[in-house]
Image: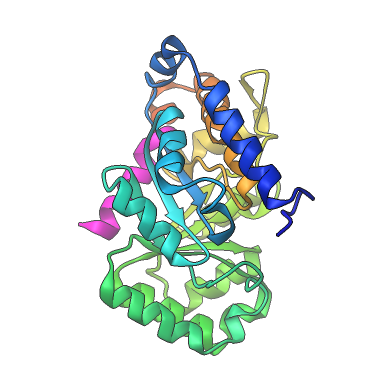
Amino acid sequence: MTSEFGLKQPQVIAALTAFFAIFGLPELQKEAYAQLRIIDTHIHYSHDAWDMLPPKEAIKVLRQAGLHKAFVSSSSDDGTQMLFEAAPDLIVPVLRPYRKRGELGTWFRDETVIDLLEKRLAKNRYAGIGEFHIFGQDAELPVVQRVVALAKRYKLFLHAHSDAEAVDRLFIQNPDARVLWAHSGFVYPEEVATMLRKHKNLWSDLALRSEQATDGKVDPQWRKVFLEFPDRFMLGTDTYTPERWYYVVEQAAWSRKWLNDLPKDIRDNIAFRNAETLAAWALK
């Protein structure tokens, strides 16, 4: 098997093993990083990562990053369950409607997805459904409508990798839904602010958004939005391929750096408090 970066599986296994064995953070660095609690709301542990980074090693990476909690969803959900079994104090399970990589463009037309979700929801406890990919009018397809209904029935948030139109359509189906907008929609900060003003139960994760800070200083446009909506942003890494596990520790350290450029209350909200609030709502 070849990864999305062109490396064959044995190469990736060897690279990951060497990286985490040799370049672990010194104890003093880990202690310093741990001073600011961090919750990462966008971690995947999918089928192509299991052999490359076994569950115990994956948990070591999350702890090395000094994470207080990690919201984990996987293709398939077996990955999430393996990490939860290994570290129930650390993992917040989120149920993804994908059995394997490659279903992100088909799941919303696949009625068997509902049976999969219903069986998992009956068996395990989750905080949310997602991360799922849905755009535009596809958010009104019957399968998506049933996912929104399941989230309402089980009191779960929806982790949506979507455009603004799809987010709007999710809220039309359930105005009381709680939606975590993956990557803040990959739109400009003023567009994020428009959506947050429109929907009181919309939160944004910042996974794969690097433009909000440079050299430890928060970008002025992002600062404006963070100050207006201090209760609506969360951190994320997005380990969408096995190679992305390289960046979990680095991402946490970088996040702590730029967060310290914000007022303490807002810093703590984005670092961990907003995620704690959302998880507590779902899991209480």
Q: Position of residue 119 (x, y in %)?
A: 34, 80
Q: Residue at x 58, y 25 (%)?
A: 254
When asked about the image quadrant of residue 117, the answer is: bottom left
Q: Residue at x 67, y 44 (%)?
A: 12
- Quadrant where the C terminus sits is bottom left
Q: Which residues are magenta?
A: 271-284
In the orientation shown, which residue stands out farthest toward the right? 6
Q: Position of residue 157 (x, y in %)?
A: 39, 63
Q: Position of residue 221 (x, y in %)?
A: 66, 34
Q: Residue at x 53, y 73 (%)?
A: 99
Work out whether residue 181 or residue 207 is closer to the camera in this orientation and state it: 207
In the orientation shown, which residue stands out farthest toward the top? 28
Q: Residue at x 42, y 35 (%)?
A: 60
Work out whether residue 34 or residue 194 is closer to the camera in this orientation and state it: 34
Q: In the image, is residue 272 part of the stretch drawn in magenta? A: yes
The answer to whether residue 13 is above or below residue 161 is above
Q: Is residue 212 left or right of residue 32?
A: right
Q: Is residue 229 left or right of residue 110?
A: left
Image coloring type? rainbow
Q: Position of residue 138 (x, y in %)?
A: 64, 80
The answer to whether residue 201 is above or below residue 119 is above
When asked about the image quadrant of residue 250, the answer is: top right
- Quadrant where the N terminus sits is bottom right
Q: Is residue 95 visible?
A: no
The answer to whether residue 133 is above or below residue 150 is above
Q: Is residue 237 visible?
A: yes
The answer to whether residue 90 is above or below residue 29 is below
Magenta segment main secondary structure: helix
In the orientation shown, which residue stands out farthest toward the left? 284
What is the total number of numbered labels drawn onto the structure image?
0
